[in-house]
Amino acid sequence: MQNAKFKMQKKALLNFAFCILNFAFATCTPQSRFLERKVIVDGRVYRYRVWLPPRYTKLRRWPVILFLHGSGERGDDNLRSLTMGLPALLAHDPSRYRAVVVIPQCALNREWYGEMETQALAALDASVKEFRGDRRRIYLTGISMGGAGAWYFARHRGRWAAVVPVCGEVVRQKDDPFPLDPPPEIAQLLGTRDPYDALARAIGKTPVWIFHGADDPVIPADQSRRMFIALRAHHGNARYTEYPGVGHDAWDRAYGERELPRWLLTQRSVMRN
């Protein structure tokens, strides 16, 4: 009787081990890839991409990066968003960033605020849940228009472990108005006497590494310089890298920085979102 019971227990343990191995192999991705996903916001469907790093597996929790593209990648094809910045680097050098990367797409004639912010954060939250994201290691980055979006999203200070704006604008040029009125929370920040100071207060001590080309003819480097000064004035955790002789497309240099992946992925948020 005891021998039969032992055999049953052994069989159960073997079955359990077999199930674990099956789960591990089924959820392990030997190569990186861009997956297609969608999220619904106010009845509208938004498609987005999720990049899984090599050897991704659901047996562990992963850091998650939200990437916001620039104005030239807007649309609804779920493809242009992969052509510039971090996704382009990941396509040819997948080993540099060992993280899940969420890549929403902003609609034409819109920017990263209001409903576009809502759909991006909804895509992020869905991806954290589906791909076992570590909620203490959620990172935010963007280029150009997406760099501006990164600055505005950064006001949700408890959500991010670190923020990396690349050639991002904070204060709009007078001849470049918003396509739609920004929501009250952003309008209030930008309507203050010193928007850089107000945004720095909102960001607090969230780690920020700023990148900009010194000769940027589209978004002056002074935007990033002033944000860096404002963050440091409030004892923020800020770094600034400016590339002499580089124009607007500073993102290849920024995401190619040897130290950036290590710095970024070692940051942890104090608060859980």
Image (cartoon, helix red, strand yellow):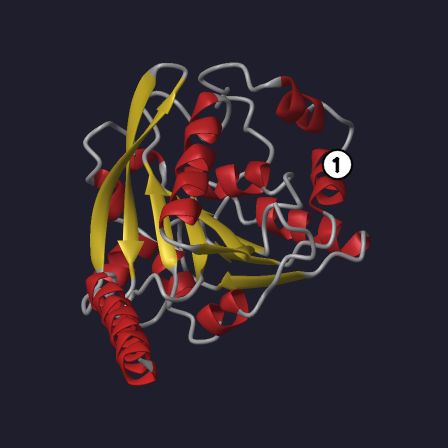
| Residue 34 % position (x, y) | 22, 51
Q: Is residue 33 above or below residue 2?
A: above
Along the line of sight, which residue is nearer the eye, 2 or 270? 2
Along the line of sight, which residue is nearer the eye, 165 or 121? 121
Q: Residue furthest right?
A: 234
Q: Tell me what residue is drawn at x 56 percent, y 19 percent.
A: 182
Q: Residue furthest front?
A: 1
Looking at the rendered structure, the secondary structure element under dot 1 is helix
| Residue 222 % position (x, y) | 60, 47
| Residue 49 % position (x, y) | 27, 43
Q: Tell me what residue is drawn at x 33 percent, y 17 percent.
A: 44
| Residue 261 % position (x, y) | 45, 69
Horizontal side of 104 relative to 65 (left or right) equals left
Along the line of sight, which residue is nearer the eye, 260 or 127? 127
How many marks do you count on the picture? Answer: 1
Q: Is residue 237 above or below residue 150?
A: below
Task: Residue type at mark 1: give it.
Answer: Ala
Horizontal side of 132 relative to 26 (left or right) equals right
Q: Quadrant of residue 96?
A: bottom left
- Pointer 1: what residue? 198
Horizontal side of 226 relative to 36 (left or right) equals right
Q: Tell me what residue is drawn at x 29 percent, y 69 percent.
A: 16
